[in-house]
Structure formats: C-alpha cells, structure tokens
Image (tube, rainbow, N blue to C red):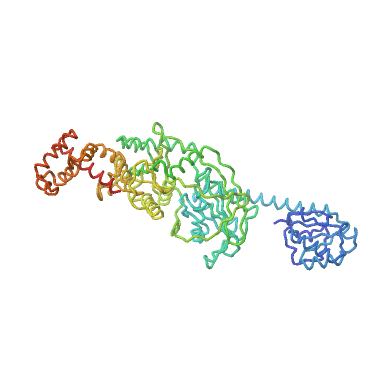
Amino acid sequence: MPPTLASLVRHPGLKLSVLAGEDRLETPVRWAHVSELADPVPYMDGGELLLITAMQLKAEDPDEMSRYVRRLVGAGVVGLGFALGVKYDEVPPALAEAAKEEGLPLLGVPRRTPFIAISKAVSAAIAADQYRAVTAGFEAQRELTRAAIGAEGPAALLARLASHVDGWAALYDASGSVVAAAPDWAARRAARLVTDVERLRSRPGPASIVVGGGGGAGATGAEPADDTAVADRVELQSLGTGRRTRGVLAVGTGAPLGTAERYAVHSAVALLTLTTERSRALREAEQRLGAAVLRMLLAGEPDHARAVAGRLYGGLLDAPFRMLVAEVPSGGAAHQARMASSAADEAPAPAQAPADATTAGTGTSVSTGTGVGTGTGTGAGTGMGIGRSTGSGTGAVPGTGPGTVPGTGATMAAGAGAAVGEPEPADPLATLADTMEAAAARTGESVLVVPDGERLIVLAPDGGSAVEACAEHARAVESRRGTKARPRGRGAAAPHGDELVIGLSAPAGPIAAAAAYRQAEQALSVARRRGRMLVEHEQVAAGSVLPLLADDAVRAFADGMLRALYEHDATGRGDLVASLRAWLSRHGQWDAAAADLGVHRHTLRYRMRRVEEILGRSLDDPDVRMELWLALKATASCTST
C-alpha cells in the first residue's frame, strides 16, 4: 500500500504529533511538498502533505486561516504539517480551529525533524510500494504464463487472474460470445455485458472500455446473493495485434485496479492475444495449405486433397459438407468499408493505453487506438487467403451469447486522453467468417475459410454449428434491416451497409466439391437477384423464374430482340408485339389466339410471317419461341416497375 498519514505518524524517526483530523489519518499520501505561499493551490496536484512554517501567513487571523484551509481542502491536500519552534512554538489556535472545522489532518513537526526527512520518508515508502507492485506483477505474469501454456489453457489463466485481482474474469470470442469465465458464477455477469462487448468490437483495436465504477460485494471472488444487484467496475480489453478484435477480456472488481493488478491484467491481455493470434509464419502456411486443398477439391482430386489436408482439415472431408460462397456487391457502403479496412491494414498498430479512467457512478469510459491488423497471405497460384477454426478452444458457457441478454444501459463518456467517434462500419465478410469460426470452435468442428478477393468461400460440416450460425446471422441481419425482396443486378448496391449475399450448396462430399461450388454460385446469383442475404441451393428452384429476369443484361437483350417489332408497331401498321404475345401464350393455336385478339386467323398468320421477316428468325424453332417469350416477359416486368 502507498504511505498514509498514519504510517508517517508511526514512523519512529519523525516524531510527528496529531493535532487535528485524527479520523482521517488513513488517507494515502502521494507526495510531501513545502510551500510558504499564502495561496499554494495553483501548485498542488492533489494527495499532498503540505509542510509549512507559517513565515508568510497571518496564522493568528481566524478569517484568513479559514479561507487558507478551505482552499487547501478544495485542492485535494490530504494533510498539513506545521513546523513547531520556528516562528511559533505552538500551532496558532486560529489555524488549529480552521483545520478541525474542515476536517483537515494537522500534524505537528518538532524542530529536530527537518522537512527533508519527511519528504524522504514519503518517497521511500512510495518507492517500496512500487517495488512491491512490480514484484507482484512479475509473479502474476509467471503464474499466468504457466496457466496459459498448461492443458486447461485460457480457463486456467482466467482463474489465476480472478484470484490476483480479487474479482472475476471472462473471455469473449471474436463473435462476442462468452467462452470461459472464472469463477463459474461470473458467466452470468459477463453475459449481461454483451452490448458493451459489441460496442468495443466495433471500434478499431487496441481499445478498452470501463463499465460501472460503484463498489459491491459481488465484485469479489465470492458469488453475490443477487447477481443482478452487482455494481462492480468492469474493464473490457480488446485482444488482437491489429485492427480487428479477435476477442475481449472482461475483468470485474470492486474498486479501480491497483498497480499490481494492472500488471496482471496487462500480462493476461498479452498472453490471451498470443493464444488468439497465430504467428505470421503459421498463418501463411495454413493459407497455402488451405488454398491448395480447395484447389484440389475443385479440380476433382479428392484423394490428393485429403492427403494434403492431413489432420488439419482431414476430418472435414470425411463427412458431407456444405460449400458457401459469399460476396459484397461493389459500390455499396459495406464494400467501401471493406476497401477502407484493407487499406488501413497496411499500417502498424499503436500500443494500447491502459483504461484507467472511469466515470462517476455507473457509466462507461472508452479508450481507443487506431491500430491495424496483420496482413493476410495468399494461396499459391490462386490469390486465396485462408482461415481455419478447430475445436481446440475452451468450452462454451451455456446460456450465453449475443442477443440473449439485455444490455447494461451504461452511458458513454470519453476515457483518459481518448477520442471517441462513431464506430467504423464492419466488414461483412470478416464478420461472417468470425461468426462461423467461433461457432465451429465452440463445438469442435473444423471449417475451411478461404477469402478470395471480394468473395469468401467456406467449407463447413453439413448440419453443424457453423452452418447454423451462418443462417442465424443472416436472419438477424435481415430482421435488423427489414429486408424485403429487392431484385438487383450484380453491380447494383443495396441501400444498406450490410449488403452481404450468400449462396449455400446442398450437402456434398469431396468427390462432388466442384458441383457444390457451382450450386453455391447459383444460389448466390439467386440471392443477389431476389434481394435476399442467404439462399440455399434447395431454394433455387422454389418460386417463379420470372424474378430472375430482373437483370439489366437480360432487359437489354430483350429490348434489342424486340426493338424492331416495337418500331414497326409505332408506325401504326399493325400490332405485331401483342399478336406475338397472344400467339405464344396459346402455344401456336391460331383460332384461339385470333379470338383473343378479335381478328381473323388469316390476319394473325400474316402478322406472324411479318414477325419472322422483321426478326429474320423462324417461329418453328422452339428456341426462338422460348427466347421471344422470355423477352416479352422481361420487357413486361420492366414496364410494370
């Protein structure tokens, strides 16, 4: 602990006496300062023991002393040391009475005790406290390191950290779900912070948030009787070496962290970052390996793919899987955010500032950096990066996850030295990859995630948690943005920032990987045209084919094919377009079509010959009839919209 007035009074070499403020002697002393100014307040920083001889003070004037002591208390001075036997043999009654009225501890300093001795005692005590904190921090670092490399991994690390800070700790994965907590009861407390974790994840790392600030028994290692009544101070720290947050560490305590506890938290952040961030060499090796496995599967070489995958992806190829293709249409807000994120990833990340600032009462303080993530490598010959998720992580905490627990209602306030702006737009492809990888890690699945330019290709077990997490993510996004069917072309942008579109194949095995990829692309095309975020291959044949004609290229083809007929009709020499539509709708039956038009069948025959002459194509060809019918439907759809 830092030095206090009581420890200075007990110091055998100082011989200090207490003249006022006996009930406030346990106040910590940050420094001892000598000043004979009538108003030393501009030079005070708070927490000082002020030492005076009263040479320049009107120490016998009650009004003057009352104002003097009041200014000292307002500046945060914790004690006043008065030199006895210099100008006054005893403390003047006016000063003593003013100190008693304001509750300011007043210490008598005997003549044989120089002020420098008090300053040295305070300095030595502060240095000893700092040494103890550093020593405790190093010991905590050693314990946390041993826990991190042990068999239990992050779970053991969190347990040690909770013990060191006399509180609780929890770990969130990249999707914002709680994956481990210590003690066990802390999982419920951590789940209530999902809203704050999501807010932190939306900011560029490294970043930290402090939620709350009130004390409470529930903040210690003992389980509170009523978890909802806990008013602890929770510090959230982002994990990861770059711009994208790979996880979040939450630490709950009953009071602001001390120096030793701060060392322990920083050590935990570093160790957990190492466990969530693979080395660049390993990442590049996995990228090359995963891209090679995918290329072999698409090339129809499943045996070679299985041999190359080995234990890394081998389990994924032993059961039916789904192929997923996702993309962000160019020109939209999400595409621009993805481009900005990719450009920013070329810069190094700054060091993270500690989140020491807290708001009064229950609130939130924020500290954000502007770091960027490590770059991703490319697969040999394909330009494909690769990500992987396996079941090596800690087990999931039941009943927790984003969207299941109400937020804390914390208000936002700027942290120490931090500028807080609007959250940057998230990269939809990265968010989807994180969501699926986190779900797979919690259940021990292996997934193959391959970024391919503006696309993301994923192989995930059929019926597994990764595919289900993808479907839930799509439902949540569509529900949030109130998506209706919005047919659009490939290059058109949706009016929202999360315009991700996903195509999902039917279950397939390694030998049918190429077919699964085609199915996923077909489903992706249908999703794009129907304005849906996710379409499975089984849904491709559902509904009418007509919405698929709502494409600029199809409309241009239809306009070009029928332009000559429309120009002919514009001269008033016959309604060839309506006649063609009636004849095709009646499957070439002359009498029925002529009756629909109210003309003689010979007139209709003449008109159809004119259609053939103008178009230069025979209506006896079924392909020509099909193309003309689709062109008529496409132009009719364009006219109706």
Residue 47 in the image, given as x and y percentages of width and height: 73, 57
Q: Is residue 568 left or right of residue 303?
A: left
Spot occupied by residue 453 in the image (x, y as percentages of width and height):
41, 37
On the image, the x and y values in percent for residue 591 come to 9, 46
Determine if residue 148 is in view.
Answer: no
Residue at the extreme top: 381
The answer to whether residue 52 is left or right of residue 275 is right
Residue nearest the observer in this picture, 8 or 481: 481
Q: What percent of the width, then of the height, locates residue 73?
A: 75, 61
Q: Nearer the viewer, residue 16 or 353?
A: 353
Task: Please give the count of numbered marks on the rendered protein.
Answer: 0
Q: Which residue reaches farthest front?
A: 572
Residue at (38%, 51%) from the top-left corner?
474
Image quarter (top left, top right, bottom left or bottom right) of the N terminus: bottom right
Q: Is residue 574 visible?
A: yes
Which corner quadrant of the image does residue 9 belong to?
bottom right
